[in-house]
Amino acid sequence: MKIRNKILLYFSATSIALVGILFFVMYWLFSEYREEEFQQRQKEKILSTLHFISEVEKKEKELTDAIDRLTINSILNEKLLIFDSSKKLVYASLDDVSISYSGALLSELNDHKNWIEQKDGLYDVVAIYFTSNNKSYYGISKAFDEFGYTKLSFLRNLLLIVFIVFSALVIALSIYISNRISKPIARLAMLLSNYKIGISPINSIIQTNTFEIRYLHKKFNELVSRTNEAYNFQKNSIHHISHQLKTPIAVLISEQERIRNKTADKIMQQEIDTQITKTRSLADIINILLEISKIESGQSVHKHSIRADELIFDCISELNTLYPEFIFEVSYQPDEPDAEKLTIYANEMLIRQAFQNLLNNCVVYSDKNGKAEIKMDSSQTGRLAILFINAGPSLSDKERTFLFSLFFRGENSRNKAGFGLGLTLAKNIIVLHKGTLSYTSPSENINVFEVQLPLG
């Protein structure tokens, strides 16, 4: 997630959540206060009615009318029941509100429990036990707090509107703040994404008041400068060293050929021919390093359509002069593929070296059976897969991590000549041709190198 979106999400979510919790607590406290305040009014209503009953002696009908006139405007939508000490109903208000559970409430009231409050839907129910002038009374009030619920509804709507407006303001403010904070970071990230090794970036100034961003920008420019220096030094070193080595190697090959022509010993001639072949391979590697340095420096290299299988057969023929007893078995999938599905667009010298390194790897790291299998799989659309399979000690999981690293040699390389450059060079060449090179070991002592290349 981008830092801008993180700032926007964290700031707005935290602010909105805190305000939402605050508003909820306010609403809940007001709701509790409304209930307590209304139930207190009910209690006072019951007590005032009981005082009135205990102090005024009238006929029952006259008493009822007097109480109703006294309380008609006190609480709306209320049912009030008054009972004497024997729990006989002595007064009931004229409302139609029912209290079917009055008997249960009366049975709970006594000297020790003289107050009960509960809810019946939106109605508040209060029951009390009261003693006046040595007489005991019970009172039950069930009422709907219309005015209180109206205020509670108004508060809820008000808080909801304020919450929505506040959320919108917080989101807008978060967008503004996140843009201000993340703009220099995004600018620095864009510079990093556009940077290419060996090409100095355009000098740019990041407008920011943040010390850390200015410091990162400064260090980024220093890093770019040093990286370019190291890259140019490496590129020029390979270029100059390769050119310096080409002349003595050419002289060495010429001297070997001259010595070969002076001797009539067949065995000696064969040995010299082997040395000449190895020296020429070294010259080819130098040429390949030059070509790779050209590609990395942005120069174009010549590519054309090549039959991959024919190139592999040429490499096998060259290796058979050095290892005549080693057998390469080449197979196709499907058995009779189209020529177009075996044709790749590549630099012949580079791709030849990659195939030669992989084939030579099969020879060097095979067991005593002296055989390797090459599978040409053209069944995929737009790609050619070439599998180099040999039987020999496989690599451990740890060794596979470093397999294509420079100068890496596994446990199976002991007592074998080499510098740990062949596979690294092969992978670099394959990658330059927009392909992939991978290693697997489907079973013990079986090694598979798979090359995937786009078709020409």
Image (cartoon, rainbow, N blue to C red):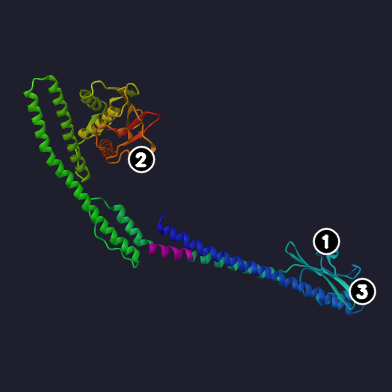
Q: What residue type is labelled 2?
A: Thr
Front one among 398 and 105: 398
Question: Is 373 positioned to the left or the right of 302 in the image?
Answer: right
Q: Residue at x 28, y 27 (%)?
A: 363
Residue beneath the point at 67% across and 68% down: 31
Q: Is the magenta stretch mostly helix, strand or loop?
A: helix
The residue indicated by pointer 2 is 401
Residue that protrudes farthest toward the right in the picture: 59
The magenta region covers 170-181
| Mark pair 2, 1: CA separation | 79 Å
Mark 3 packing: few (<14 Cα in 10 Å), some, or many (20+)? few
Secondary-structure class at tag 3: helix
Tell me the residue that label 3 is attached to: 60
Residue 52, given in percent of the width and then of the height, sits at: 86, 78
Label of residue 101 in the image: 1
Q: What element carries label 1?
A: loop
> In terms of sequence position, does the residue under pointer 3 or pointer 1 come before the other?
3
